[in-house]
Image (cartoon, rainbow, N blue to C red):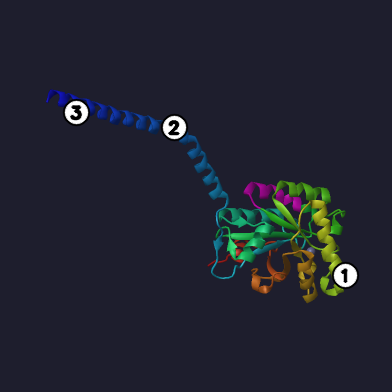
Amino acid sequence: MQKKFGYLGGCLVLIIAIIVGVGLRQRSTHQVTPATAHRPVTQTSHVKTTHVATTKPWIKLKRPLQLPILMYHSISSGNNLRVPKQQFVQELTYLKQHHYRTLTATEAIRALKTNTIPQKKVVWLTLDDAYKDNTKIMATLKKDHFHATINVITSFTHKTNHLSLAQLKQMKATGLVDFGSHTVHHLDLNALTTAQQRTEIINSKSWLDQHLHQTTTLLCYPAGRANAATHKLAKPAGYQLALTTQEGLASLHEGRYNLSRLRVTPGISTATFATLINVHHS
Ligand SMILES: [Zn+2]
């Protein structure tokens, strides 16, 4: 019996030793694993956070987007096309206080084509003719983190009252403005032959593409007018949208090359300005 107990006891001790040994090995393995895995896990979660922030999905609208595209010209005073700087600044202050986002040309194209918006309140600031006094808007754009689109008459860049190529380049480098075509000579397209229209539309785009190292996608009609021939020419020339001076909110049902805008006139109150851009998206 003693011999048998001795044998069984030995076996028992051996089994206990094995169990304890395995247990210790497992514990030490567990201690090592989290320590080595900790760093990669942290990095992955950090990358994921950044990824989510930059690719926040745009809001898909149930009804067709009605986009307020504001139209300015000169930032000065003297006639009905000139808006004083003080008024422009007040209007941007209103946009800031009411949490508007100003779209770039690329964002406006995306919004209209996909019927989505990056946030509830959006507006697109456009200035026609590229007057030299448009440099006055840069400080307020920078301060309020806003963006504007300037439509350039390409043969006017040597004129005293218009932005020079050097100025266009400087403004573009800030990232606060982008540039569309307002044709080469600012002629009423309705009065031109199809061949003349083609030259105005194509040559202005090539000039902007070449000198500003961009792909110009926006066309703005001089005098706000165009005809069926212009609409047909715009797309093969490489434009994705075209702006008129028809009064109203822009909507894709007007036609991509026939978009309405909202004229900002000098002396309007901030309340009138607010009414102009007030859209209920759904
Ligand atoms: Zn013009």
Q: Amino acid at mark 1?
A: Gln
Q: Which mark is residue 196?
A: 1
Which one is closest to the eye, mark 1 or mark 2? 2
Between residue 88 and residue 65, name the one nearer to us: 65
Observer able to see residue 272: no
Is 138 in the magenta? yes
Of the image marks 1 and 2, the number of the one nearer the N terminus: 2
Within 10 Å of disc 2 (Cα), the crowding (few <14, some 14-19, many 20+) is few
Q: Amino acid at mark 2?
A: Ala
259 on left or right of 237: left
Q: Residue at x 79, y 65 (%)?
A: 237
Quarter placement of the N terminus: top left
Residue underneath mark 3: 8
Within 10 Å of disc 3 (Cα), the crowding (few <14, some 14-19, many 20+) is few
Of the image marks 3 and 2, the number of the one nearer the N terminus: 3
72 on left or right of 114: right
Between residue 239 and residue 43, name the one nearer to us: 43
Q: CA distance from mark 3 to mark 2?
A: 41 Å
Observer able to see residue 110: yes
Dominant SS of magenta comes to helix
**SS class, disc 2:** helix
